[in-house]
Amino acid sequence: MGDQPQTKSDTPELSTHQVQELSVADIDDLCDATDAAILGGGGFGWIKLPAREILERYWRGVLAMPSRMLFVARLDGVICGTAQLITPPRNNEAQSFTANMTTVFVAPWARGRGLSRLLVESIEKAAREEGIGVIHLDVRESLETAIKLYESMGYVHCGTNPFYARIDGKIIPGRYYYKVIDPALATKV
Ligand SMILES: CC(C)(COP(=O)(O)OP(=O)(O)OC[C@H]1O[C@@H](n2cnc3c(N)ncnc32)[C@H](O)[C@@H]1OP(=O)(O)O)[C@@H](O)C(=O)NCCC(=O)NCCS
């Protein structure tokens, strides 16, 4: 008996990167991943599946907004997760060194392979390149895997809002986190 040939499915290719444009197929994959994440219970603000054209418009809108940087995760080339970095408006000079990481999710079928960690690392790298020193984020307290991920990556829990979100009629708390990604900033407080 010889060695089994190594097929692509034995070692799936993982990647994350920023996107400035998306093909029709990519938008379709992104919408499929969003649907899966919403049905899986963590599709950022959406609780019920929006119509496909609304989702497509949402993603095209994200691409068009200068204050949003869109990142995707791919498994064997197929988009299966995403995250965004939002920079403050130009008039907010006082917070121009900060940015907000939001809408981090990986479709249930692609989870457990390290893609969310790669997504967050890509965001942090791009943020540093943009001169951002601090990343903020907030997360529902019920999203325990996400909380573990952020805390393991050095995000500091700095507050809790007991009235953070309403899911199926129930008010649930949310947590706020920050991470200093520019070490020079740490000496300036
Ligand atoms: C949170 C989420 C993004 C993680 O995505 P993922 O690609 O499966 O995560 P990774 O494979 O990169 O794993 C990240 C860490 O979480 C751990 N983890 C992954 N799945 C887990 C699970 N089901 N239970 C416990 N820990 C888990 C991993 O062990 C890993 O830690 P390690 O690197 O120390 O081993 C994904 O579960 C998700 O989309 N959840 C719903 C949406 C959500 O919570 N978004 C965050 C909103 S702010």
Image: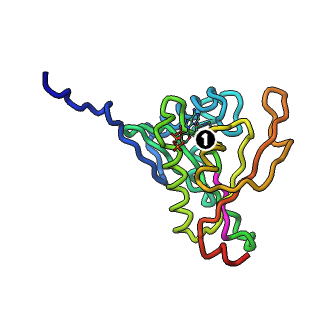
Percent from the top left, x then y, of residue 125?
51, 62
Q: Is residue 175 in the magenta section?
A: no
Looking at the rendered image, the quarter that the N terminus falls into is top left
Across the whole image, how many numbered discs are drawn on residues?
Answer: 1
Name the residue located 59 percent from the left edge and 51 percent from the top edge.
Answer: 84
Q: Is residue 139 left or right of residue 112?
A: right
Name the residue located 59 percent from the left edge and 72 percent from the top edge.
Answer: 183
Residue 47's quadrant in the figure?
top right
Q: Is residue 118 left or right of residue 59?
A: left
Q: Is residue 163 left or right of residue 86?
A: right
Asked whether residue 33 appears in the rendered view, the answer is: yes
Q: Residue 25 versus residue 161: which sits nearer the camera?
A: 161
Q: Amino acid at mark 1?
A: Arg
Ligand 1 located in image quadrant: top right
Report crowding for label 1: few under 14, some 14 to 19, many 20 or more residues within 10 A (C-alpha).
Answer: few
Asked whether residue 28 appears in the rendered view, the answer is: no
Residue 158's quadrant in the figure?
bottom right
- Please state the extent of the stretch shown in magenta in the rendering: 97-101
Q: Residue 175 versus residue 126: which sits nearer the camera?
A: 175
Name the residue located 67 percent from the left edge and 57 percent from the top edge.
Answer: 100
Q: Magenta span: helix, strand or loop, mainly?
A: strand
Percent from the top left, x then y, of residue 19?
48, 52
What secondary structure is marked by label 1? helix
Q: Residue 72 versus residue 142: which sits nearer the camera?
A: 142
Residue reaching furthest top?
1
Looking at the rendered image, the quarter that the C terminus falls into is bottom right
Percent from the top left, x then y, of residue 80?
49, 37
Can you identify the residue that label 1 sits on? 57
Judge whether 104 appears above or below 39 on screen: below
